[in-house]
Amino acid sequence: MKDFVGVIDSGVGGLTILRQLTENASRNFLYIADHAFCPYGTKNEQTVFRRADTLTGFCKDTGASEVVIACNTASRFAAELSEKYDLPIYDVVAPTCRQVMETTVNKRVALLATNGTIKGRAYRNILEPLGITVYDFPCSSFVPFVEQNATSTVSCYQAVDQALSNLPKCGADTVILGCTHFPLMLLQISHYCPSAKIVQCCCNLPNSDILQASPTVEYLTTGDVDFAANAAKWYGNISFKHISL
Ligand code: DGL
């Protein structure tokens, strides 16, 4: 496959972004789920950088013309990796912030994200200078439930309650699902913010001259292929190939 768009995430959360991308562009895509290192949100910055670096380098070496970091936790490395690999690299934080700016009226927003995203301050760095107050809700505990396809379990509902019981008190009119895994828990999350507007992550892949008549999508995981397929069941019957990276 040549001239493809590489789409990378720690696991299956980035498929929520891939779905938007495939709907909007007739391009070849290569999705890489880094299950061997999932989750990213509780790992230190160097580890997440190294993984994003490795996955981006692989995409470049195998013929990617662009890379989408479909992961908020790793998005902060987009500019550095773009320079290193001389490749257009798109993140999900900046375009999502643009949606937030158009959505919030009272300029109070709740950020539901991994511990790593919150610590990295990517959303705050963009939104606070615009006079928007960001209330952090660390929700790394949600990610394994999505990966294990276990979002309907009692333990998942308990984890959501623990993380979000104070959400109604902050007065936010907008809630950012600042992790690509979280749209898969929309039902559980929206219970805690029934009147707020929910903004999901997005990515703006610019229009390209490279269009495919019969676009293909391939799926790789650095982990177990059956685990990956089970985690991605909501997306369809995906056949992952294993890759050691
Ligand atoms: N889906 C990713 C994000 O948007 C990472 C989740 C994780 O691996 O902790 O941040």
Image (cartoon, rainbow, N blue to C red):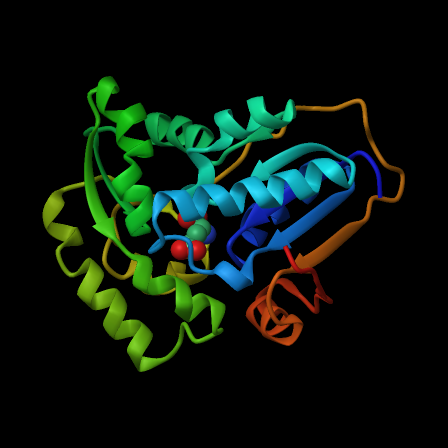
How many numbered discs? 0
**Closest to the observer: 45 or 230?**
45
Q: In which quarter of the image is the C terminus?
A: bottom right
As drawn, is 143 to the left or to the right of 35?
A: left
**Closest to the observer: 219 or 151?**
219
As drawn, is 151 to the left or to the right of 173?
A: right
x 42%, y 59%: residue: 39
Q: Quadrant of residue 182?
A: bottom left
Please, is residue 2 above or below residue 157 in the view? above
* Residue most extreme to the left: 169
x 56%, y 56%: residue: 34
Kindly tell me whether residue 199 is visible in this rendering: no
Kindly tell me whether residue 197 is visible in this rendering: yes
x 21%, y 26%: residue: 132
Q: Where is residue 52 in the image (x, y as percent from the top left)?
A: 53, 43
Q: Where is residue 188 in the image (x, y as percent from the top left)?
A: 33, 65
x 52%, y 47%: residue: 51
**Closest to the observer: 75 or 165?**
75
